[in-house]
Amino acid sequence: MSADIVPTVQAENDARLHDADGHRIAPGEIAIGVIIGRTSEFFDFFVYAIASVLVFPKVFFPFVDPLTGTLYSFGLFALAFLARPVGTMIFTAIDRAYGRGAKLTIALFLLGGSTAAIAFLPGYESIGIAAVLLLALFRMGQGVALGGSWDGLASLLAINAPEGKRGWYAMIPQLGAPLGLIVASLLFMFLVSALSAEDFLGWGWRYPFFVAFAINVVALFARLRIVVTPEYARLFEDRSLEPASVMQTIRSEWRLIAIGAFAPLASFAMFHMVTVYPLSWVFLFTEESPSRFLAIEAMAAALGVVAIIVSGYLADRFGRRTVLGVTAAAIAAFSGFAPQLLDAGEAGEAAFMFIGFVLLGLAFGQSSGALSSSFSRRHRYTGSALTSDLAWLFGAGFAPLVALWLSSQYGLLAAGGYLLSGAIVTLLALWLNAELGRSID
């Protein structure tokens, strides 16, 4: 192992010492590690997303109108999703050469470092276009790191799920999304309410980015103490969770990767339609207070937590394919009327968010890792990572940008049409692929 890698695995050594007494990692602890890891990643994600609406247009794009500045911000937002598959390729090589502990440590420090670096960025008024270029660079750093932060714990849960409990175990990693949104929304709500606009845009918005780095350190240890245990190492050696060459995986498993990327498109498109996009619309086109809407978003996300849990019960009773199909149809119906609620005052906004998060939770709870057990053992770990990367890229990466542009040009109904297209793709994928249906029931 090179001298450059040795310092990065100190956390891994600490995790090994914690479990040196032979303490066995229970499934419940794996679940906790998964939830902590995903919550930290989504907290980073939503801190950046909220800042893309409330902060970046004014700080980094003051030379254009607020709508154009927000569209530019959403363009940079998408860079992380483009960079994420690149991160998977880079960190798969690190995983194969130095082990998963080194990979996770480097990836999560890159994620936390890129996030914290944004907090120190001067604005456009100070250094001009260099501020925008640096913001883009750090956003890509976040994306590369997210590609490398894939730890296989979600696949481990799926592999070890008892018969009849696959849906329940599949929803556990998804809880991190609404939990991360709740924390990020409440933190920004407090800052917006407690500070003057000048103080918030001057320094207050930077605080959540520092918090994200601290949360990443906690999440790193929580995950390392699982992945370095003997039980996990044995699964690695059995090739159930062994990283394979990315190109070999694509050549061998391209069909499953494509199915897994497009089947959950409805839930991934819905993800941004009820998290990032409505905040931008309300902030730009209504008189609604940002702090009040962030409070609504946090309450709606709490409903999303409940809906995700319910999705596990429903999937085990009726089948994951059925849940995905029914929720995709419900999202299609939702797209026909719901976006207009954002123009119906405070009650309409709340209805949009609450109904949307219930549908999102039911769909999103079963949208990830549907094909983990269908990949060959040799390619299961890398195939699952690539599927996740591509699902986020196609389903969510450009959703805020496209939805805001469409609705600003053609009205809210056009944003509903965009959401409808994702639901149709999901229904087509479920209908056309008998293999997908067999693998996720």
Image (cartoon, rainbow, N blue to C red):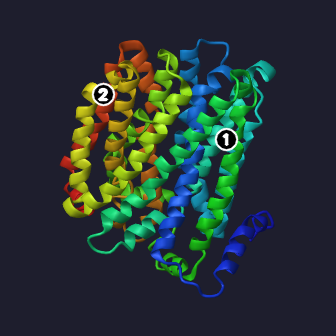
Q: Residue at x 67, y 78 (%)?
A: 18
Q: Residue at x 43, y 46 (%)?
A: 302
Q: Residue at x 58, y 53 (%)?
A: 40
Q: x%, y% of residue 32?
A: 51, 66
**Is disc 2 surrounded by few (<14), some (14 to 19) or many (20+) residues within 10 Å?**
many
Q: Is residue 93 left or right of residue 274?
A: right
Q: Which mark is residue 338?
A: 2
Q: Which mark is residue 135?
A: none
Q: Nearer the viewer, residue 214 or 98?
A: 214
Q: x%, y% of residue 184?
A: 57, 42
Q: Residue at x 45, y 22 (%)?
A: 404
Q: Which residue is mark 1?
A: 208
Dot 1: element: helix
Q: x%, y% of residue 364?
A: 36, 48
Q: Does residue 144 appear in the picture of this structure? A: yes
Q: Is residue 402 above or below residue 90?
A: above
CA gap between label 2 and label 1 equals: 31 Å
Q: Identify the amino acid type marked 2.
A: Ala
